[in-house]
Each structure stands twice: as C-alpha cells, then as structure tokens.
Image (tube, grey):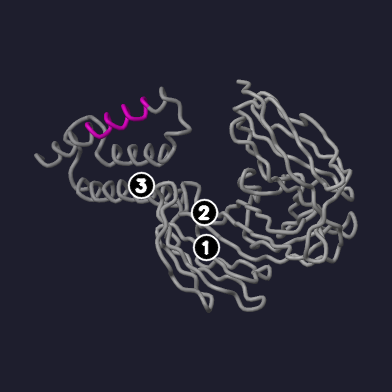
Amino acid sequence: MLAGQSRATGHVVRVTAGDTLPLPGIAVVLHQVGQSAQGPVDTVLADRQGRFAFHFAADTTAAYLLSARYGGIEYFSTPIASSPGRPDTTILVVVADTSSAAPVVLRQRTIVISYADESGTRTVLDWFVLSNAGDLTRVSPDTLHPSWGAPLPPEAQSVELANSRLSQFSLEALTFRRDSVLILAPLSPGDKELMLQYRIPGSLRSFVVPSAGVTDSVFVLLEGGKGAVVSTGFASRDVRTIEDRTFQRWAGVLRGTDPIRVSLSAPLFSTGQLLGLLATLAALGFVTLGIRLARRLVAAPPASAGPSPYWLADAAARLDVRYAGAEATTSPEEWSRYLAERARLKAELERALAVSRRS
C-alpha cells in the first residue's frame, strides 16, 4: 500500500587519495525493488556540493536504493529508509576511478559441509569475502580475463550461486570454467561477498580445497562434527546450530598457498549399495534355506502332491531379488500383487515344512 511522502537526501562522493570528494552534476537514480514493481522511480542531478534529495510516495512492501553511474560503472547505495516519519538524510553514494591492476584479496573464507544425503553426496557452501582496500575499482583488463577468480575443488559438482540475497554478485557476473569461478563484474572499494554452492561425493574420505590466497582467516563447519580439518594451524572452536542442524566449527589461518585439508567420515556404503547388499543377502538366505531343504528331502519322497519346499524357497528368493528396492518405481497395483504372492509362497512354504517334519 502507498504511504505518505518519504524523503531521502545525501551526497555523491568520489574516493581519491584515501579521502572522499564531492562529485557535482552527476545523475542519481532512485530504484524500487518490490513484488508488484521494480525499476527506476526518479532521477535528480547532484548540486555543486554533490548533494541530492528525493521526495517520493513509498510502497511499504518494497525496498529502495540509489545509484550513480560513473566511468561506465553503476554504483549503488545500501537500502534506504522509506518511512515518512523517519527520513534518511545521511546517504552516501560512493564512486571511484577504475584500474585493471587494483589489488583485490580474499580476506575470509567459510566452508560449510553437510552430511551425505540419500543421493550419496554432500552439499558444500563456499562463502568468499573479497576486499578491495584501495581507492580504485578493479575492472577486467579485457573481455577475455576476469576482474577476479579462484580455483575450486576438483570434486565440486553442479556449482551454482547459493543465495542471491547474500551474494553481492548476480549470476550474470559469474562464469564457471572447469574447476574455477571467475568474476567478470567490477569490484569497487570495500568488501564484497560471494556465496557458492556445490556437491561432492559422499564417499570422499579426504576433501582438499585450494586456498585461493586467503589473507585473514578460514572457517570450516562440519555437520555433526563428523570429520576434522587437518591443515596446520587449525583448531576446533565451538558448536554452531544452523536451522536445527549442528555443526562443529574449525578456525585457522593458511600459510601461503597451502590448501585446506579436511578429513571426512565417509559411510561404508551408499544408499544404493546398501539396498543392493540387502537384496543379495536376502537372496543368499533363501538359496541357503533351499539347499538345506533339498538335502533333507533327498532320501524321502514328497509327502504331498504340492510343490516341494525347495521349489517354494527358490520362487520366493527370485521374487524378492526382482523387487528389492523397487517400491518407488513400481506401480501400487503391481507392488500389491508382489506382496500378495510373497505372502502366498511363505504360507505354502510353512505348510510344506510342517509336512516334511511330520514325515
């Protein structure tokens, strides 16, 4: 719903020589981001002191932010307050000159590793905090090279942007090439966050993550505490609960280009392997039972004209092997027929055994 008039005022400044200077005459754009509408709402020119002011009717269900285009790059403010009773009057839109050689470092990295799920794989969240501590915006030197990039683990599968609300990069600004992530967007002064998600095989006992030159700290969270970070300089810190799931947190600092080495507790069998093993054991059990019955009945003719226990045990074993682990892919009608036939064979086998014991 539309509220009363909101007010947003502030300055556009340019970072230079460790300071900020007002930028006069630049166009400042007010953007609305909401469910019903999103896009530019209004545009004003900054005055000689770089000051600007907006008066607008705010949609209370939407968010608002400002941008200014400088040197071919769009710079955005943080979200602004839109309540008419509490105007936002200290907004800064910060722009900068560009360079393809401006230093950008990976200041911090957090890796969250889950349990292996039903598919036999683990989900990994890889959270990068990039830092541009200088006065210049880092840009790509040409269309063939990124503004920043980092290697990913070779086992990483289905790499994607994990959370567009937390990551400060759009999917269009990223590209994934073999075992690397590349950022094509400019990197303005300050910190930027990038969160990726990928999957690794649940059978891995050792998981090695390239360091990508982390300069500050690394955190690794292992679900349930199943595993350990074995790189030098890491220690177990505490237990964290995230969405009702428990993670053991490890923290440390890497030396040079040393990778992050994680020892994982892998299950002996994946879900598919376990189902196959159970089916095989069931079949072997029925076959063994059939062999024992056959040996007992070699010297004596069957006591009735019905099927022999050996035949019944073999038929039941064949039926179980055929349908083992297949309930999800079998129609309800066919599965009901399987259960009924299995019950019939079991009942006949019990009767045949009773007859053989009496004889």
Which residue is depicted at the point 79% across and 58% down? 20
Q: Are marks 2 and 1 in contact (CB under 8 Å)?
A: yes
Q: Element type at marker 2?
A: strand
The amino acid sitting under disc 1 is: Leu
Query: Which of the two residues, 55 or 284, is positioned nearer the viewer here?
Result: 55
Report the front residue among 46 and 173.
46
Q: Which label lies toward us, 2 or 1?
A: 2
Q: Is residue 355 above or below residue 147?
A: above
The reply to whether discs 3 and 1 touch (Cβ–Cβ < 8 Å) is no
Characterize the magenta stretch by its predominant secondary structure. helix
Residue pictured at 50% horizontal, 47% vertical: 119
Amino acid identity at mark 2: Arg
Camera-side mark, 3 or 1: 1
Q: Which numbered dot is residue 122?
A: 2
From mark 3 to mark 1, how far is it between C-alphas?
30 Å
Mark 2 or mark 1, which has the lower sequence index? 2
- Quarter of the image where the N terminus is located: top right
Q: Residue 135 is drawn in which quadrant?
A: bottom right
Measured as percent of width and height from the top left, residue 180 is found at 72, 59
| 301 with respect to 169 (left or right) | left
Place of residue 295 in the rendered image (x, y in percent of width and height, measured from the top left): 23, 51
Q: Which mark is residue 283?
A: 3
Instruction: Confirm or deny contact between disc 3 and disc 2 (CB under 8 A).
Output: no
Determine the secondary structure under disc 1.
loop
| In the displayed structure image, the side of residue 67 where residue 359 appears, left or right | left
Look at the image and give the residue range highlighted in magenta: 336-347
- Three-letter code for the amino acid on which mark 3 is drawn: Ala
Q: Residues within 10 Å of mark 1 (few under 14, many from 20)?
A: some
**What crowding class fits label 3: few (fewer than 14 Cα within 10 Å), some (14-19), or many (20 or more)?**
many
**Residue 204: numbered disc:** 1
Please tell me in which quadrant of the rendered image residue 97 appears: bottom right
The answer to if 338 sits in the magenta stretch is yes
